[in-house]
Amino acid sequence: MFIFHKIQHVVSKSMYCPYCHNTETKVTDKRDAGKLTRRRRECLKCEKRFSTHELVEFSELKVLKKSGKRELFSKEKVRNGIKKSCEKRPVTEEKIEKMTEIVEKKARLKKGHVNTTYIGELISKELKKTDKIAYIRFASVYREFADLSDFKKEIRSLINGRR
């Protein structure tokens, strides 16, 4: 059995049969395996079957910094910020990775570019749902708490269920 492996962008030109090069195929089965999608296809001309493995490629996401400078979105920076806030807290690596994925996914929904404020709000929201202490840690740096009164205000809003 011939298996055709092709990594392609989800919005590709056209899929073609590796046997007869016909561009008309139909998907008979689809399975997601992590970041890859395996599709079993059948050629509508020669009726032979083959598999493709497709990988989603993301376009570059630009981040607009407070200084006005633009740089590429860094999933690693998001992960590190979350991880630092969760140090010595009962938050698993899997949960940190899940929060990182959610932040990246939501940031990519914005077209063109995102600003650091938006990314900070996304991280805050995920930490707040996961661990209130990690949230306070992140907020104190992200919102640049100046003194204890800033901590008190934020803790009060958490206790009262606001924000």
Image: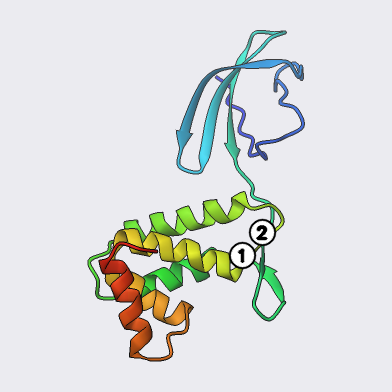
Disc 1: which residue: 73
Inter-mark Cα distance, 2 to 1: 5 Å
> Residue at horizontal 47%, vertical 79%?
143
Tell me where residue 85 appears, x and y as whole percent.
36, 74
Tell me where residue 137 appears, x and y as whole percent.
35, 77
> Residue at horizontal 64%, vertical 50%?
58
Disc 2: which residue: 61
Residues at circles 2 and 1 in contact by the CB criterion of under 8 Å: yes
Q: Earlier in the sequence, mark 2 or mark 1?
A: 2
Residue 86 in view, yes or no: no
> Residue at horizontal 51%, vertical 71%?
77
Report crowding for label 1: few under 14, some 14 to 19, many 20 or more residues within 10 A (C-alpha): many
Q: Secondary structure at mark 2?
A: loop
Splitting the image into 4 quarters, where does residue 83 fall? bottom left
Residue 111 vs 8, above or below: the answer is below
Tell me where residue 32 appears, x and y as whole percent.
47, 33
Splitting the image into 4 quarters, where does residue 114 fall? bottom right
Report crowding for label 2: few under 14, some 14 to 19, many 20 or more residues within 10 A (C-alpha): some
Q: Which mark is residue 1?
A: none
Tell me where residue 94 appears, x and y as whole percent.
33, 56
Residue 106 in view, yes or no: yes
> Residue at horizontal 39%, vertical 59%?
126
Between 77 and 160, the one nearer to me in the picture: 160
Residue 99 vs 82, above or below: the answer is above
Q: Amino acid at mark 1?
A: Phe
Q: Quadrant of the C terminus?
A: bottom left
Q: Quadrant of the N terminus?
A: top right
Residue 8 vs 130, above or below: the answer is above
Left or right relative to 90: residue 116: right
